[in-house]
Image: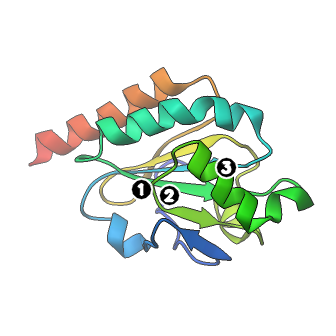
Amino acid sequence: MKLREPMPELAGATEWLNGQVTKEDLVGEKPTLIHFWSISCHLCKEAMPQVNQFRDEYKEKLNVIAVHMPRSEDDLNLEEIKKVAAEHGITQPIFVDNEHKLTETFENQYVPAYYVFDREGKLRHFQAGGSGMKMLEKRVNRVLDELEKTE
C-alpha cells in the first residue's frame, strides 16, 4: 500500500476474534491503527505489551485492529491463535487472515507491521519490525494533532 491510499475493506477473514468491525465502523470517527502479527513471530510477541499499552492509552482517540497473518501451517491453528492472543492480552478485534486475503490487499510482507490511517481512512504511516513504537507514537500523535486543528 502507498501513503494516502484509502483503507481497504476488511473482507476475507477466516474468523474474527474479540468482535468484528468493518471499514465503515472505523472511517469517519477516529484514526485507526491496524497491526499485523503472527503466533510464530517472536518480535510480535515482544512488541505486544507496547502495542497493548498504546491501545489502552489512546482508546478514546484511536481504533486498534489486529490482523493475524500466518507464516506457516502451524500458524493456522485457531485454538493456538486464541491462546496466544489471550496470553499476550490482545483484546482488540483480531482479523484472522488464514487465506492471506487482507495481507495481499495490503501487499504486506512483514510481521509485525503497523499501518496508521487518518480519520478519513487514508494511509498516513507504515512501519515494519518490532523496535519502532516511539516512531509509531509520533506518527499517531501527528495524525491526532491534525484532527484537533480541524475540529
* Residue linked to disc 2: 5
Q: Earlier in the sequence, mark 1 or mark 3?
A: 3
Q: Earlier in the sequence, mark 2 or mark 1?
A: 2
The amino acid on which the numbered mark 1 sits, given as a three-letter code, is Lys
Where does the image place residue 132, in percent across and percent down from the top left? Answer: 56, 24
Q: Is residue 68 visible?
A: no
Say what secondary structure mark 2 lies in.
Answer: loop
Mark 2 to mark 1: distance in Å? 5 Å
Say what secondary structure mark 3 lies in.
Answer: helix
Q: Residue at x 39, y 42 (%)?
A: 55
Left or right of 64 on screen, residue 99: right
Q: Which mark is residue 84?
A: 3
The amino acid on which the numbered mark 2 sits, given as a three-letter code, is Glu
Mark 2: few/some/many CA within 10 Å (<14, 14-19, 20+) = few
In depth, the one of 7 and 69 nearer the eye is 69
In depth, the one of 15 and 29 nearer the eye is 15
Mark 1 to mark 3: distance in Å? 30 Å
Discs 2, 1 touching: Cβ within 8 Å: yes
Mark 1: few/some/many CA within 10 Å (<14, 14-19, 20+) = some
Where does the image place residue 128, in percent across and percent down from the top left? Answer: 65, 36
Q: Is residue 144 visible?
A: yes
Badge nearest the viewer, 1 or 3 = 3
Q: Earlier in the sequence, mark 3 or mark 2?
A: 2
* Residue linked to disc 1: 122
Left or right of 16 on screen, residue 29: left
Q: Residue at x 41, y 33 (%)?
A: 53
